[in-house]
Amino acid sequence: MKKNLLIAVWFTLITTLLFGLGYPLAVTGLAQLMFPRRADGQLIERNGKLIGSRIIGQEFTGPSYFHSRPSAAGSGYNALDSGGSNLAPTNKALLDRVEADVKKLRAQNPGTPIPIDLVTASGSGLDPDISPAAALFQLPRVARARGISEHALRALVEKHITGKQFGFLGDARVNVLELNLALNRLYPIRSGSANGFAGVGAAGSSKR
Amino acid sequence: MTVNGWLQILVFLFVVFLLAKPVGIFLARVFNHNKTYLDPVLRPLEKVIYRLTGVDEKREMRWTEYAIAMLLFSGVSMTLLYLIERMQKWLPFNPQKLPNVPPFLAFGTAASFTTNTNWQAYAGETTMSYFTQMAGLAYHNFTSAATGIVLAIVVIRGIARHETEHLGNFWVDMTRCLLWVLLPVCLVGSLVLVSQGVIQNLNSYATAHLIAPHSVQVTGANGKMTSKEVTRQVIPQGPVASQEVIKEFGTNGGGFFNANSAHPFENPTPFTNFLEMVLIFAIPSGLTYTLGRMTGSQRHGWAIWAAMAFLFLVGVSTVYWAEARGNPLLVGTDQRASALQPGGNMEGKEVRFGIADSSLFTTVTTDASCGAVNSMFDSYTPIGGMVPLVNIMLGEVVFGGVGAGLIGMVVFVILAVFIAGLMVGRTPEYLGKKIEAYDVKMAMLAILILTFITLGFPAISVVQPFGTSSISNPGPHGLTQVVYAYVSSAGNNGSAFAGLNANTPWYNITTGLTQLLGRFFMIIPVLAIAGSLAKKKIVPESSGTFPVTGPLFTVLLVSTILIVGALTFFPALSLGPILEHLMMMAGKTF
Amino acid sequence: MDKRDRRKKQSLTDRKILSRAIADSFRKLRPQTMIKNPVMFVVEVGATLTTIQFFWNIFHHTGQIGFDFQITLWLWFTVLFANFAEAMAEGRGKAQAETLRKARTETQARRVWGDDQTEIVPSSKLRAGDIVIVSAGEFIPGDGEIIAGVASVDESAITGESAPVIREAGGDRSAVTGGTRVLSDEITVRISSNPGETFLDRMIQLVEGASRQKTPNEIALNILLAGLTIIFLVAVVTLQPFAIYSGAPQNLFVLISLLVCLIPTTIGALLSAIGIAGMDRLIRRNVIAMSGRAVEAAGDVDVLLLDKTGTITLGNRQATALYPCKNVSELDLARAAQFASLADETPEGRSIVVLAKEKYGLRGHEFAQHNPSFIPFSAHTRMSGVDLDNRQIRKGAPDAIAKYVAEQGREVPPETKQVVTEIASGGGTPLLVAQDRRVLGVIALTDVVKGGIRERFDHLRAMGIRTVMITGDNPLTAAAIARTAGVDDFLAEAKPEDKMALIKKEQAQGRLVAMAGDGTNDAPALAQADVGVAMNTGTQAAKEAGNMVDLDSNPTKLIEIVEIGKQLLITRGALTTFSVANDVAKYFAIIPAMFSVAFPELQVLNVMHLATPQSAVLSAVIFNALIIIALIPLSLRGVRYRPVGAASLLRRNLLIYGLGGVIAPFVGIKLIDMLLVHLHIV
């Protein structure tokens, strides 16, 4: 008993050094050496300024951007507060939220059924993706707002569809941040437009 | 449900099947002290550890000493974790200058990680420093997993050995498990995860300046809604990959971030998702092969594997069916699966995983007592959410936690053998060992304690204001939330119907207690069984021996698990998820 | 045997047993008795609670009197049915004990006093070591060993066998049992037991079940059943808070009904009846098991040690073939052999006569015409035979005959010598026949394996039991018989210590060994074996060493004992499985009934479409009670046993009692529900 207690103390200390510090620091070193960009979170910089992570979703509002899914992370896409809504499928709060969103979206694109992921919050609240269906659903609105042809925009969206990994894993998806960055690059928002966005860093005027 | 969805499920199961034999053989070799390719590197390290800790490598222990050593180690390492949490402010690797963890939360977290539950009443990204995550939490991911594995090995030895009291040395088994089994896979696995986008750094959190700032409505301190401008996003960082891999491989499940494996930094691609699921099942599945190998009845190992695989398939099919079907209450939405969208009930799920990978992950993580989640159970359809609940209620034996799953399965095997074994006209025996009163007593004790805590605490919680006030989803779903909290704690799973506010004194105390009871009151009786079995003679097999191989035994085992394991919970299930499902179909909301 | 069986079968339905069992069912309601059976004790407590609630409801004019009353009534029935099952099982034993008691009547004993004196004392005053003299017509006053004399004894009081048996001093047939009657001659007996401890006393206790203790497996099973009971108790107790949360609290009657339906009442009610009935089945085959543990061990036996003589082969060797020498016709040899044996009264001699008659059609009618004079067997010549008018016919062991013909300078022909060797190496005994000092041929005497024994060994093998033949024969002979009989192994030239060593060796490898024996030198092995069956004709030492006594002294019965042991275990396992499997249907009856009023959606769980919540609950409770009664015959009779391997046995029993256990209550509850509705009971 006493002997084992002593061993327990030493064993804890030694293995903590080995597995609690040695191992993660070694992995950090190797990761930084082999995959530095990935290990740091695939951060995107524009003009020396950090504008986000490729794989952390962001909130987009206003008609001229493709919108991300609803988010339950804080007030929306708060990366310090990741998580889902945890609303039960029978919870009135969920049904009311979805109903309101459906109403809004239907007004933007009447007649088309609303892809489910566009009105449901993700588990992380930081989902960087929307389904291709959700992107295409928003296409007419964005095209209108940016004053470009739906055809051209469709080509851009389709270019941004990530297929199933290895042809069968997961689901096809569109990275919202990347799509919107490409959108801004190719079809900058016309100044003075009704939904005037000034591009990077400017304040938005639309409300969710 | 789509063909591609089923393909992923079947490919996954096939990979798990293929891995069972190599993993099983490797485990047997490691714990039988046979030579492995890793010896030249690890053997010297192993000897150093023994020298420094004063372990006598040759000395074997009885089950009682083994249990005491296990408890002492759990106690000491749990204390160290508590101290680390309480002192993280003064310790290195804390770029965010996170304060010390409050005492109660620190204690609950320490208990939770020591028991392999990894129930989290905190958000990692805003509570735990990198030092705490690495040296405290990830470390316990290693040790609690190793503890489970070595205990399973002891149970296997108890079955395999005869007329002996010696079952191995806890410290030696632990060391070999950590060095040979966990470390190599984690080193390689973490780098694979990084290559896919799981982060691994010690940087301070990055602040991004949004390209499209927007305003949000927030409720101010005075209760008034005000508009707030959002121009920045703080992106957390940290040594995630090194922890992620052991979180799955050791069926721990405690996320680096609050969103766990739904978080893009923990689980960025469908491939990482696939890999994480395989890691969860690798050891539990392999241990069935180890059981067969070490007891000399390989077909028995496979019979158990088949029982597990069957229950897994039933579970995953049910979740997948329920989730793909969607939520009929969400009118005006398109929930049909197509090439362009996953469809189904997407609330709480990530687009990159869709319905199939979410359903699969959910089944895997609750079959094994992992508890990592890539989607939020609370938002699952009632039937989809019932499956994880039932998986844990069955005692975490469908592959189960590393080691703990096999241990739980052995309890059911003993019960199955005992109940039906008489029907071949002999007093029950399991692989040549007579099952006697003492063994049955210990097996029943393990099941009894679990029943008491998993039904007792919820029963109190749902009729007392201190319990019901935490319920976030009213109606039958609320009952499910409460029951799930205790079932998950008792099964050392750690996943949650996370809407329930478990961060109250009542839930913190009772779930913590449940985790400790669920862990040690399962392990100790089963260790006692191992000790008792090891002392017995082995009755040679004959054609009159009760067959513990083949489809017949698998059917018997599955029936025993379902009848003994699940029937107890049938009333709670009828008033929770089943009732909610029926009401949802009838259009009722809460 | 058959007659006796029939007589005892009738007693199953005997009015007296039935009425006593019914009375006992109520007597057993005492909590002190009930608590020994935790499952049924819980039911009794439940019934008591509902009774109290029922009367409370009447006084306060609440509740549904009709429903509450019926539930309460059926709960009491459940307890009574369980008691009835046990009482029925005990009943047959009790009836038998009464018969035995009559044999234990006080008798007068002539105790030897001093050198030659005798005194008359009541048998109850006899102590172990006393010496008594018993003459024709007297009852033997106590168990003992004959130390002088020989007598025919009527043991029908104990064995049921009316033919008298011979008991004599010395040898292996020296034991006598108190309560049996000497028919002829006079014997001197050393009493070996004190009053109250005699064989008869023990037997009465055993058949009455008074000294019945739970066997190891029964204890383990009881732990399982108690554990399941507690688990379901927790499930039902916690159901109420869940129901309250859901807004549909339940009343006591429904909750207790659910509890009683879920706990394993079927096996709980029948468990001890099964055990008693198992012992009873042995008793009906005239085997007394000294403990229930021995019966269980019999089911577990891995190795059977069987004595060759009397068990595997008929008691004596028999003539089976004739081998004439060259130039001798088979018929002549047969005639000579027959003539030589007509006066031979040994079993071997008679078998030669029979062979000649059956195989060669010789009746020996002309025998008397030849003025025969018999030459009896003498130890000196080791031959026997007959002298006819002018012929001398002799038969005997080959070397004796060889010596006999050598006196005339003749020899045994080489080909005949060859035949002799062959017969010997095949396990048989060769006898040579000579006429006028000329060898005619060989008679082969061989062991005759009992009819059907091979099949029995095949069955045993299928059950996973290895048979080992024990014989004093040389290995060659033993091997040949072993082959013919189909035993797995043999121990040749066996001495008692070899037998002991074999048992210990098998046991060291974890096997359970059963054997039968009668001699004093068998006693250590009988004690060492896991199942030792002593022959009633055997010595007192053997009877005390074994854990079973076969009153018929038939060693083949060992096989039946094993089968009875297995049958007992199978019955226990089958009813346990059935009982546990029943729960599924009961849930589907009661849970919807409990909540479908508050939540009509839950009606979909009412898969049996039971009429009303009340009828559903009541049907489940009634089914639960009636199934006990329905299964009493099965538990008393035992599940039918088939000698097949474990895998197919398990498959079959799982299908019948496992799957059947899931399905049967669905059907049963539905039928009861229909009946209840039809009769307007609820």
Image (cartoon, rainbow, N blue to C red):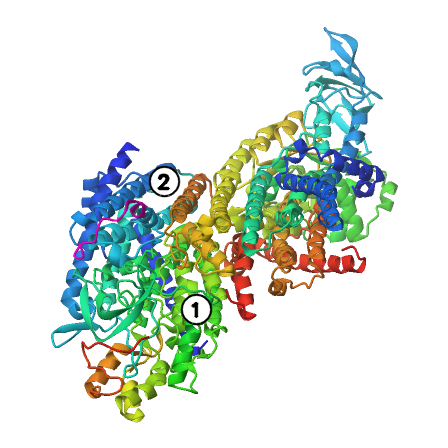
Q: Position of residue C150 (x, y in %)?
A: 76, 23
Q: Nearer the viewer, residue B551 or B335?
A: B335
Q: Is residue C350 above or below residue A144?
A: above
**Per the image, is B104 magenta?**
yes
Q: Nearer the viewer, residue B163 or B404?
A: B404
Q: Is residue B419 above or below residue C52?
A: below
Q: Position of residue C610 (x, y in %)?
A: 70, 61
Q: Which residues are magenta?
A: B94-107
Q: Is residue A206 left or right of residue C524?
A: left
Q: Is residue C136 above or below residue A135?
A: above
Please, which chain is the residue tagged with disc 1 on? Answer: A
Q: Residues within 10 Å of mark 2 (few under 14, many from 20)?
A: some
Q: Quadrant of the N terminus of chain C?
A: top right
Residue holding disc 2: B67
In the rendered image, the residue lying farthest to the left is A48
Residue holding disc 1: A94
Q: Nearer the viewer, mark 1 or mark 2?
A: 1
